[in-house]
């Protein structure tokens, strides 16, 4: 096999089944729409957060602090007035303000990522509900086929009958809410029991 054959086979994109390709395209659109919905300031903050989260930024910060200290100590040793004499109050102020801004940058970026995560969770939930409905329909059709085939013994199957009905999302949501309330009540009761002196 020649190198041109290898490179041409590697450069060809694999052919995906239509339903997988549609899913990939839908997820790509979700990310593109999320990026398009951000303001210029949000994009700038995200770029700064990405830059400062790299090891290179830590190295640059260490070099900057070292130069600041060396310059001030060198000026003092040369008999000149340093612009930030020990204990380097200006450096402490700059690093404190920088830390405050980094905290805000991280919070803003995390909030945007949380919005995207919520969209992905909603998409996952909708797909799971759709899959559950499809599975219920398949079970229903199989049961109907079993009843209609003359050479298959017709026997009632309570589990299959139950699974052939899709779950009611509202009912599931109500049960989840009740379970959360019960769990909180148990936690409160446990905490109250722990506070009661023996």
Image (cartoon, helix red, strand yellow):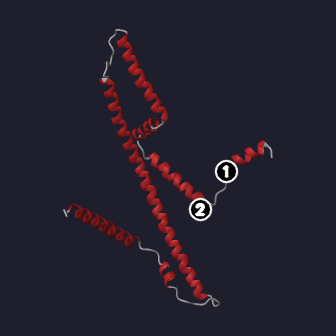
Where is residue 95 drawn, in percent x and y?
35, 30
Identity of the residue drawn at 49% across and 85% down: 158
Q: Nearer the viewer, residue 61 or 167?
A: 61
Is label 2 in a helix, a strand or a loop? helix
Where is residue 102 drawn, in percent x and y?
37, 37
Give the farthest residue toward the left.
Answer: 197
Horizontally, residue 81 falls left or right of residue 52, namely left
Identity of the residue drawn at 52% across and 85% down: 157
- The tag on residue 167 is none
- Give me the C-alpha separation between circle 1 and circle 2: 17 Å
Q: Earlier in the sequence, mark 1 or mark 2?
A: 1
Give the farthest residue toward the front.
Answer: 198
Horizontally, residue 135 falls left or right of residue 106, namely right
Q: Nearer the viewer, residue 163 or 63?
A: 63
Question: Relative to 14, is 162 above or below?
Answer: below
Identity of the residue drawn at 49% across and 64% down: 127
Q: Nearer the viewer, residue 163 or 68?
A: 68
Do tag 1 and tag 2 residues touch (Cβ < 8 Å)? no
Q: Give the quarter of the image for residue 188.
A: bottom left
Where is residue 15 drawn, in percent x and y?
67, 56
Give the farthest residue toward the top.
Answer: 79
Please name the residue that numbered disc 1 is placed on: 13
Q: Nearer the viewer, residue 176 or 73?
A: 73
Q: Quadrant of the C terminus?
A: bottom left
Is label 1 in a helix, a strand or a loop? loop
Q: Residues within 10 Å of mark 2 (few under 14, many from 20)?
A: few
Question: Relative to 186, is 150 above or below?
Answer: below
- The tag on residue 19 is 2
Question: Relative to 180, is 100 above or below?
Answer: above
Q: Residues within 10 Å of mark 1 (few under 14, many from 20)?
A: few
Where is residue 149 drawn, in percent x and y?
62, 88
């Amino acid at each position: 096999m020649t190198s041109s054959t290898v490179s041409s086979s590697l450069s060809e994109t694999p052919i995906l089944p239509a339903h997988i390709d549609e899913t990939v395209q839908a997820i790509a659109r979700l990310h593109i729409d999320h990026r398009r919905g951000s303001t210029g300031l949000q994009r700038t903050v995200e770029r700064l957060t990405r830059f400062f989260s790299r090891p290179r930024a830590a190295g640059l910060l260490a070099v900057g602090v070292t130069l600041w200290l060396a310059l001030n100590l060198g000026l003092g040793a040369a008999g000149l007035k340093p612009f930030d004499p020990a204990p380097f109050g200006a450096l402490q102020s700059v690093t404190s303000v920088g830390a405050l801004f980094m905290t805000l940058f991280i919070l803003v970026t995390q909030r945007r990522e949380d919005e995207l995560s919520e969209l992905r969770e909603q998409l996952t939930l909708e797909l799971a509900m759709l899959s559950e409905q499809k599975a219920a329909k398949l079970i229903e059709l199989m049961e109907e086929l079993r009843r209609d085939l003359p050479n298959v013994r017709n026997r009632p199957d309570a589990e299959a009958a139950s699974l052939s009905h899709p779950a009611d999302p509202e009912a599931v949501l109500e049960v989840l809410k009740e379970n959360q309330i019960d769990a909180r009540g148990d936690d409160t009761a446990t905490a109250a029991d722990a506070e009661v002196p023996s």
